[in-house]
Image (cartoon, helix red, strand yellow):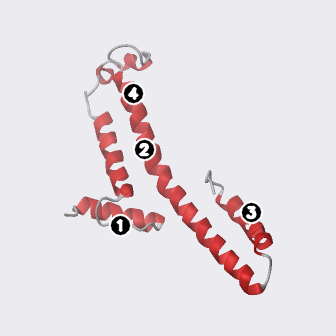
Amino acid sequence: MITIVSAVGGMAISLAYGLDIKETDDPHVNRAETAVESITDVTGSGVYLVDILPILRHVPSWVPGAAFREQANISRKIQEEFRHLPYEETIGNIVRHLCQKILQMAVLTGHRPLEMLSLHLWWMLSATSTRLEI
C-alpha cells in the first residue's frame, strides 16, 4: 500500500526532475526517505556526547566515543546522492533525447550524422555543464 508521504514525495520528484516514478519501491523515493531519516537520526538532541560537550567535535575519529563522525560521513554521502543522482539522471535523459532528435534530423536532411551530432552535442554538453559520463 502506498503511503501518502511516498505518493507526495514521488509526485514532487516527478515534477521537479521529470522522472517516471514507480508506484511502489521507487529508488528515488526510497533515497529521499533515507535522506530524511539520516537527518533526523543525526540531529536528534542528545544522541551523541558531542551534543553535550561541543569541544569533542575536534576529537579524531579513531578515539572511542567519536562514532558521530562516522555517522556524519554516512549521512553526508546519503544527502549528496539524494541531491545529485536525480539531477544527473535528468540531464542524461535530456542529452539522450536530444541526441536521438539530432540523429533523426541528420538522416532526414541528408547531412552526415556524426558532423551534425558533434556540433550540437558540443553545444548541449557546454550548456548543461555537468559531470555526466556519456
Residue 77 lies, with reference to residue 56, above or below; the image says: below
Label 4 crowd bin: few (<14), some (14–19), many (20+), radius 10 Å: few
Whole-number angstrom distance, CA of label 3 to CA of label 1: 33 Å
Q: Give me the residue at 80% from left, 80% from top.
A: 111
Q: In the image shown, does 18 or 101 lie closer to the viewer?
A: 101
Q: Is residue 40 left or right of residue 86?
A: left
Q: Amino acid at mark 4?
A: Glu
First in sequence: mark 3 or mark 2?
A: 2
Residue at numbered disc 1: 11
Q: Give me the residue at 41% from left, 20% from top.
A: 57
Residue at numbered disc 4: 70
Q: Give me the residue at 26% from left, 59% from top.
A: 5
Give SS at disc 3: helix
Whole-number angstrom distance, CA of label 1 to CA of label 2: 19 Å
First in sequence: mark 1 or mark 2?
A: 1
Residue at numbered disc 3: 122
Residue at numbered disc 2: 79
The image position of residue 119, as x and y in percent, is: 78, 68
